[in-house]
Image: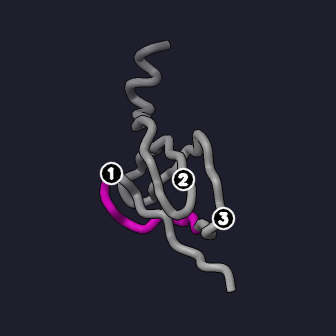
Amino acid sequence: MVKMKWIFCPVCGNKTRNQIREDTVLLNFPLYCPKCKQETLIETKKFQVTVIEVFDKKQENKAE
């Protein structure tokens, strides 16, 4: 049986809409949280989630 876990938002700590399996590897994955409406760039390997950087669409629009 394959273990699965929910990915939790690194900003607010709530459960997102994504699940990962034990063998899932994500690189530069844009994780969106429906609760705090923030997008965070993450990496994951063996249930270990690492935050790369926090996206803020307001700051992104100012840079352009």
Mark 3 burial class by Cα count in 10 Å: few <14, some 14-19, many 20+? few
Q: Earlier in the sequence, mark 1 or mark 2?
A: 1
Q: Report the span colored magenta.
A: 12-19
Please, is residue 5 above or below residue 49 in the view? below
> Could you say where residue 24 lies in the image, as x and y percent from the top left?
65, 60
Membership of 13 in magenta stretch: yes
Q: Which residue is mark 3?
A: 23
Query: Which of the two labelled residues, at mark 1 and mark 3, occupies the earlier sequence position?
Result: 1
Residue highlighted by disc 1: 11
Which amino acid does the dot numbered 2 rest on?
Answer: Thr
Vertical placement of residue 54 versus 5, above or below: above
Residue in view at x 50 percent, y 13 percent: 64
Hey, which quadrant is residue 36 in on the image? bottom left
Of the residues shown, which amino acid type is indicated by label 3? Asp
* Residue at the disc numbered 2: 44
Give the number of marks.
3
| Residue farthest along the bottom direction in this orientation | 1
Q: Position of residue 16 (x, y in %)?
A: 48, 64
Mark 3 → mark 2, Cα distance in angstroms: 10 Å
Q: How is the structure coloured here?
A: one colour
Residue 30 in percent (x, y) is at 55, 44
Q: Is residue 39 left or right of residue 45?
A: left
- Please report the residue visible at 50 percent of the width from the left and 41 percent of the height from the top: 41
- Quadrant assignment for the N terminus: bottom right
Main SS class of the magenta portion in the image:
strand
* SS class, disc 3: loop
| Mark 1 crowdedness (10 Å alpha carbons): few <14, some 14-19, many ≥20 | some
Name which residue lies at 40% across and 37% down.
54
Residue at the image position 42 percent from the left and 63 percent from the top: 8
Q: Secondary structure at mark 1?
A: loop
Q: Nearer the viewer, mark 1 or mark 3?
A: 3
Image side of residue 4 versus residue 32, left or right: right
